[in-house]
Amino acid sequence: MSLAAPGDVARVNIDRVRGNIAFASIVEIIKPSEQRIEPPCPYFGRCGGCDFQQLNYQAQLDAKVEIIRDCLHRIAGIAEPPEISIHAAPNQWHYRARANWQVDQSSGEIGYFEAGSHRVCDVEVCAVLNPKLESVLEQIRRDIREGSITNLPRDVRAAVSEDDVSVAPPVAGFLPNDVHRIFSGETYWFNADSFFQVNPDLLEAMLSAALEGEAGELAIDLYCGAGLFTLPLARRFAKVVGVEVNSHATSFARRNLAAAQLSNAEVFTTNVGDWLRNLTRPLPFVDFLLLDPPRTGAENAVIKGILELQPQRISYVSCDPATLARDLKKLIAASYQVQRISAFDMFPQTHHVESVVQLSRATTWTT
């Protein structure tokens, strides 16, 4: 039930039933849960962005761990998932360093889609935005209302670093500048048109969890983006291959590798499934493979290609527990074993959670 808190006594409306699952919306809170708090955002319930603001922060963390555990049990068929430790966000508010704002081209409203619709919720202030991005949103809104922006885009993408912002398409005097951040001693350049994680506060911890103890001859980085994992992998492995379909991202990955003077990594701009499908046989021995797919998870062709490569160890970085569990089920069926699961609260005030699962290939002995 959306927008509920564990322990709420509520009158609800059953919106739809799918299989043995009923989806309901709250009509009235009769007795609020002890975990329920007053959402500070005036758009809560309308805006489709934050859906956990009604929960105190510890309840949010507990719920996210339970979401992961439920998906692993129900979808992946893992009877007893290993213990999941979740890393709390240092900042529960004003953490988002990236945003995608929707624009109603007829009314000039700008913000986020309302929950369950494509209507734009005109958000004057967003409580989870980095203050610099909040200033960008305010300036764009002012220019729209004053009529100085005549050709409104359908959406505006924005990213911020410590000292600069990148906005695409160019609007209200803002440009798609290249910006950079530094994590674990590595410098990463990117812009509003290339994916980079929304919450910089937890990136070093996530990098450490995904690459813990890894080193060897060959590592493969699938969906490598601007090279977040590619750079540290290139310091740990003799040879690294990155694959990413977004040309903006791969241009930054190559630039970041060159600036770090790392010549032992090669980045391909192509569909990940196509790259795996077209690999020359026999396949090389792969010590380690990392994949960080979009929310939809890895396509069937990608899982098939990974299983043909037979990497000794895998780190799966995921922002969706359901598609993660779906893909883990296939890997486990092919004799991979889950070693560790870590969770990272990259998206406070929402139900979304980032997970890192480390797997190793089971060794079979013959006599």
Image (cartoon, rainbow, N blue to C red):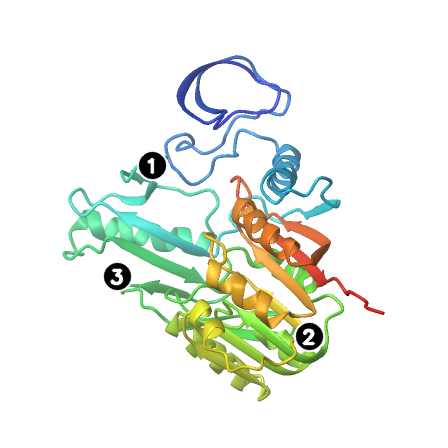
Left or right relative to 92: residue 11: left
The foreground one among 13 and 309 is 309
| Badge 3 density bin: few <14, some 14–19, many ≥20, Cα 10 Å | many
Mark toward the start of the polypeptide (1 vs 3): 1
Q: Is mark 3 on a helix, strand or loop?
A: loop
Residue 314 appearing in the image:
yes
The residue that label 1 is drawn on is 114
Mark toward the start of the polypeptide (1 vs 2): 1
Are the residues tagged 1 and 3 within 8 Å (C-beta)? Answer: no
Left or right relative to 324: residue 138: left
Q: Which residue is drawn at 48% across and 67% down?
A: 163
Quadrant containing the C terminus in the rendered view: bottom right
Instruction: Check disc 3 and give the amino acid type.
Output: Val
The residue that label 3 is drawn on is 171
The residue that label 2 is drawn on is 287
The foreground one among 24 and 276 is 276
Marks 1 and 3 sit apart, C-alpha to C-alpha, by 23 Å
Q: Position of residue 223 (x, y in %)?
A: 49, 67
Are the residues tagged 1 and 2 within 8 Å (C-beta)? Answer: no
Task: Determine which quarter of the picture holds residue 79.
Answer: top right
Instruction: Check disc 2 and give the amino acid type.
Output: Asp
Mark toward the start of the polypeptide (2 vs 3): 3
